[in-house]
Image (cartoon, helix red, strand yellow):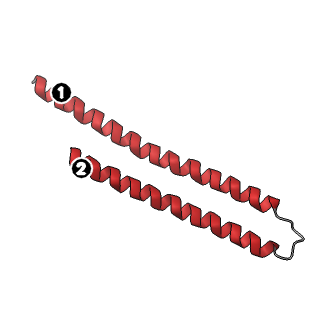
Amino acid sequence: MQKQKKIRTIFIIYWIFLAYIIAALIWWFIALNEQNKQMTAFQIQDLKPGSPSFAQEKTAILALQKRKTVQYIGEGITFFFIDISRCNIYF
């Protein structure tokens, strides 16, 4: 009976850590995405509206923001699958 209790405790701790890792990945994405939005707003605000290349520069900045968001999603998915595969090996 004591052995079953230890296994159950380990099982619960394992899933708590896994939930923590997933929550950390989600928080990481949210933080990076918010920073990306702030940087994009700052860069657009820094542009000169009367400049002949204003529209082109703004388009380039918005494209960079979108590329960074896709990059963060890709990195998060990669880390998620690495973590899940490690969890399957250990458990």
> For mark 1, what is the residue?
6
Separation of residues labelled 1 and 2 (CA atoms) = 20 Å
Q: Is residue 51 left or right of residue 66?
A: right
- Circle 2 crowding by C-alpha within 10 Å: few under 14, some 14–19, many from 20: few
Q: Is residue 25 above or below residue 5?
A: below
What percent of the width, then of the height, locates residue 63? 64, 70
Q: Is residue 46 above or below residue 16?
A: below
The residue at the far right in this view is 50
Which residue occupies 56% across, 61% down? 69
What percent of the width, then of the height, locates residue 71? 52, 62
- Circle 1 crowding by C-alpha within 10 Å: few under 14, some 14–19, many from 20: few
Mark 1 or mark 2, whichever is nearer to me = 2
The residue at the far left in this view is 1
The tag earlier along the polypeptide, 1 or 2, is: 1
Quick one: SS at disc 2? Answer: helix
Q: How many marks?
A: 2
Q: Residue 56 is drawn in which quadrant? A: bottom right
Which residue occupies 45% across, 55% down? 76
What percent of the width, then of the height, locates residue 81? 34, 56
Quick one: SS at disc 1? Answer: helix
